[in-house]
C-alpha cells in the first residue's frame, strides 16, 4: 500500500489521498520515506521559495511585517480549504491579491504600503473566519 492509493487505511481510520504528487500526504519525511516517495527536492524547493519570498518582502514591506505577510494568507487558506493543494492555491491567491489591493490602496490613500497590505490580509482573514462560523 502506498500514498498513491485512492484510499489507504492507517490505524483503523480511512485517509483520503490525491492522485497528483502535489496533493499526496507529505506531512513528514518519515512517512514519505516509509512509502518510498522522494521529498528531498520538494523540501529544497520550499526552502528556496521561502528564502526568495523573505528577501523580496524585506524590500517591499519591511522586516517586522514579513511574518504577518507569510502567516496570514496561509491561515486564511487553512480556514477555507479542504485539501493541502487547494490550501496552497488559496494562500498564493490571497497573498498576491491582497498585496495588489494593498499597494493600490496605499497609493490612493497615501499610506505606508506594508501596513496597508497587512490590513487588507487581516480583513480577508476575518471575512474567511466569519464565513467559517
Image (cartoon, rainbow, N blue to C red):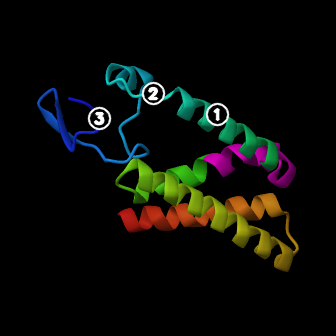
Q: Earlier in the sequence, mark 2 or mark 3?
A: 3
Residue to which mark 2 is pinned: 38
Q: Residue furthest bottom?
A: 108
Residue to which mark 3 is pinned: 3
Viewer-closest of 91 and 18: 18
Residue drawn at the location 77% of the way across and 59% of the way down: 115
Report crowding for label 3: few under 14, some 14 to 19, many 20 or more residues within 10 A (C-alpha).
many
Asked if the magenta segment contains residue 65, the reply would be: yes
Residue 44 image offset from top left, x and y in percent = 61, 30
Residue 35 image offset from top left, x and y in percent = 32, 24
Residue 130 is left or right of residue 105, and the answer is: left
Residue 112 image offset from top left, x and y in percent = 85, 63
Residue to which mark 1 is pinned: 47
Q: CA distance from mark 1 to mark 2?
A: 16 Å
Q: Are marks 1 and 2 in contact (CB under 8 Å)?
A: no
Q: In the rendered image, which quarter is residue 54 located in?
A: top right
Amino acid at each position: 500500500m502506498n500514498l498513491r492509493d485512492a484510499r489507504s487505511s492507517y490505524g483503523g481510520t480511512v485517509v483520503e489521498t490525491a492522485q497528483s504528487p502535489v496533493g499526496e500526504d507529505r506531512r513528514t519525511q518519515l512517512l514519505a520515506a516509509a512509502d518510498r516517495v522522494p521529498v528531498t527536492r520538494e523540501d529544497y524547493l520550499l526552502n528556496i521559495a521561502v528564502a526568495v519570498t523573505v528577501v523580496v518582502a524585506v524590500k517591499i514591506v519591511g522586516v517586522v511585517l514579513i511574518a504577518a505577510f507569510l502567516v496570514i494568507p496561509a491561515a486564511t487558506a487553512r480556514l477555507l480549504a479542504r485539501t493541502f493543494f487547494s490550501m496552497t492555491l488559496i494562500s498564493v491567491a490571497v497573498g498576491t491579491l491582497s498585496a495588489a489591493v494593498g499597494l493600490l490602496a496605499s497609493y490612493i490613500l497615501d499610506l505606508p504600503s506594508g501596513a496597508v497590505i497587512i490590513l487588507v490580509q487581516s480583513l480577508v482573514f476575518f471575512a474567511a473566519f466569519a464565513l467559517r462560523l
